Image (cartoon, rainbow, N blue to C red):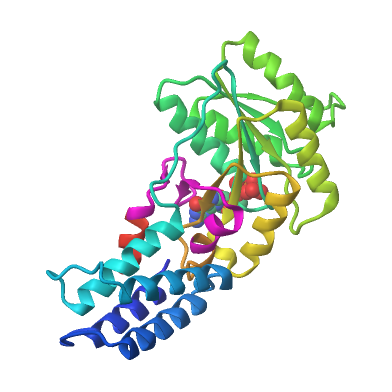
Amino acid sequence: MFDTLSDRLSGIFTKLRGKGKLTDADIDATAREIRLALLEADVALPVVKAFIASLKERARGAEVSQALNPAQQIIKIVHEELITTLGGEGRRLVFAKQPPTVIMLAGLQGAGKTTLAGKLSRWLKGQGHQPLLVAADLQRPNAVNQLQVVGGRAGVDVYAPEPGSGVGDPVKVARDSIEVAKRTAKDIVIVDTAGRLGIDEEMMQQARDIRDAVSPDEVIFVIDAMVGQDAVQTAEAFRDGVGVTGVVLSKLDGDARGGAALSVRHVTGQPILFASTGEKLEDFDVFHPDRMASRILG
Ligand code: GDP
């Protein structure tokens, strides 16, 4: 992940070494190269534009410290702009004042929702919570079973329709799960929902119906970091179709160019809450914009 972008940026910075002072022409040339590097990493155009505009303004401004040479100054600004693009301070999960806290997972099929449900519930359990996983993905034949498997691994209860019960209404399953959570003293409900391979109105409507049935405290949009430029369209569709309050990046362990990771905050207007970095339940952590920015800069 980010290997190409990291290499490109370090090449750009190397060229600045040894320069005594940066002229406007130097700044323009550097900004142009960084722009290209970001575009080649599949970062969305509006994000690149905002990044470069801010970079140029700051590089020309007088704010730069005398203690740093020009290359270090540019690296510092790029580092800070990366942090801003990735969400600045970051944000933690919102919990309901009155339990249970309801977290709804949304995203395309294969994005990593069910895996995340297991990871998140294990993580929350480790923090002393009592989560309940809810199988409201009744589209994919194996989805309920898969959630039961990850729930078993995480040591967390799963609420699902009885096999063969004929209960095929994900909205009802989601709604009923809130009562089940109250009855069984669970303080967090994590609702796994169905995704499709592409955006479709029926899926969005179902997600909205589930949302309206459970009034979630968080609607977490799960996005596969490997998807490149398509990430923008998908993120916009979920932002407008369901309303997103937070994002989880999955498959950050892959060798994607990183564009989705750098675009999704800007596109959804919502913070990245967690990062998923593998198939195992423990391959998961709170997202730290500053650490990711440092990783990109190598
Ligand atoms: P869903 O359709 O959104 O519920 O997606 P799944 O949770 O079923 O994940 C789809 C596939 O991606 C599965 O094979 C998962 O094991 C895999 N997967 C999920 N998260 C990650 C991750 O962070 N890294 C890697 N390498 N694979 C992941």
Q: Residue furthest right?
A: 166
Q: Position of residue 21 (x, y in %)?
A: 19, 85
Q: Residue furthest front?
A: 62
Along the horizontal axis of the image, is 251 left or right of 201?
Answer: left
Along the horizontal axis of the image, is 298 left or right of 168?
Answer: left
Dividing the image into 4 quarters, which one contains the N terminus?
A: bottom left
Q: Position of residue 37 (x, y in %)?
A: 44, 80
Residue 72 visible (yes or no): yes
Q: Position of residue 213 (x, y in %)?
A: 77, 27
Task: Name the residue rendered at 21%, 73% in the picture.
Answer: 72
Task: Name the residue rendered at 50%, 25% in the picture.
Answer: 155
Q: Give residue 30's quadrant in the image.
A: bottom left
Along the horizontal axis of the image, is 122 left or right of 102?
Answer: left
Residue 298 visible (yes or no): no
Camera-side residue: 194 or 240? 240
Number of numbered discs: 0
Task: Name the residue rendered at 39%, 63% in the picture.
Answer: 82
Determine if the magenta segment contains residue 287. yes
Camera-side residue: 247 or 25? 25
Q: Position of residue 206 (x, y in %)?
A: 81, 40
Determine if the magenta segment contains residue 224. no
Q: Is residue 298 above or below residue 175?
A: below
Q: Is residue 41 above or below residue 190?
A: below
Q: Give residue 148's quadrant in the image.
A: top right
**What residue span does the magenta drawing correspond to?**
262-290
Dividing the image into 4 quarters, which one contains the C terminus?
A: bottom left
Task: Name the residue rendered at 38%, 47% in the picture.
Answer: 89
Q: Give residue 223's quadrant in the image.
A: bottom right
Q: Residue furthest top?
A: 183
Q: Is residue 262 above or below residue 41?
A: above
